[in-house]
Amino acid sequence: MRVSPVYRNPDGTWPKVPEGHKVGDRYVAARSNGGSVQWKRLYRSLELKSEEEVLVFLVAHEAFHYLRKTRQVEGRHGEIEVDAFAARMLEQYHHEPNIGTPPTHSRR
């Protein structure tokens, strides 16, 4: 999962990478004042323990793309926000795993 990046400090040092996170590529963007900002992409592992969890995460991930594109939800349309939304939906699924399951009806 992509998570918020770490930004280089003004003194040139880098903040400590949070535990459990992996560092990706480094990026540089020029600023209009002649300076620049540098950041490193961060990733965090997310263990999905069943096919149901994979499905919840995948559908929520893609649903956010649609909801954001159609302006039904606020925020940026980036993978960090998309994955965060999917992770929240997965957490909700953990608390209410039968939330989308139709009730069973007994046959007579």
Image: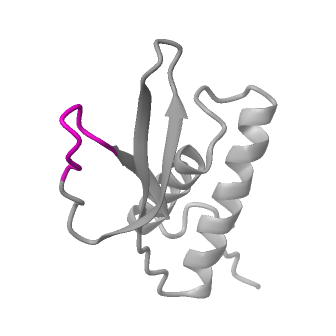
Q: Is residue 14 visible?
A: yes
Residue lying at the far front of the rendered structure: 34
- The spot of residue 82 in percent (x, y) is 60, 49
Is 34 left or right of 57, judged from the image as shown? left
Q: Is residue 55 magenta?
A: no
Which of these two is toward me, 46 or 53?
Answer: 46
The single residue placed furthest to the top in the displayed view is 33
Question: Would you identify the image quadrant in which residue 41 lies?
Answer: bottom left
* Image spot of residue 102 (x, y percent): 69, 67
Query: Is residue 10 covered in magenta?
Result: yes
In this rendering, is residue 74 above or below 99? Answer: above
Of 76 and 86, the residue lying toward us = 76
Q: Quadrant of residue 59?
A: bottom right
Q: Is residue 2 above or below residue 106?
A: above
Q: Would you place residue 43 above or below residue 28 in this image?
A: below
Q: Please count the marks in the image.
A: 0
Percent across and percent down for residue 103 are 65, 68
Residue at image location 65% in from the left, 57% down from the top? 61
Magenta stretch in the rendered image: 7-15
Q: Can you give x and y, in whole percent of width and height, for residue 48 in the image?
A: 49, 81
Image color mode: one colour
Q: In the image, is residue 58 above or below residue 27?
A: below
- Is 105 placed left or right of 33 in the picture? right
Image quarter of residue 77: top right
Residue occupying the point 75% across, 26% down: 71
Front residue (pair 42, 61): 42
Q: Identify the residue at horizontal 42%, vertical 23% (top origin).
A: 35
Q: Which residue does the image show at 53% across and 49% down from the upper left?
A: 80
Helix, strand or loop: magenta stretch: loop
Instruction: Give the quadrant of the C terminus.
Output: bottom right
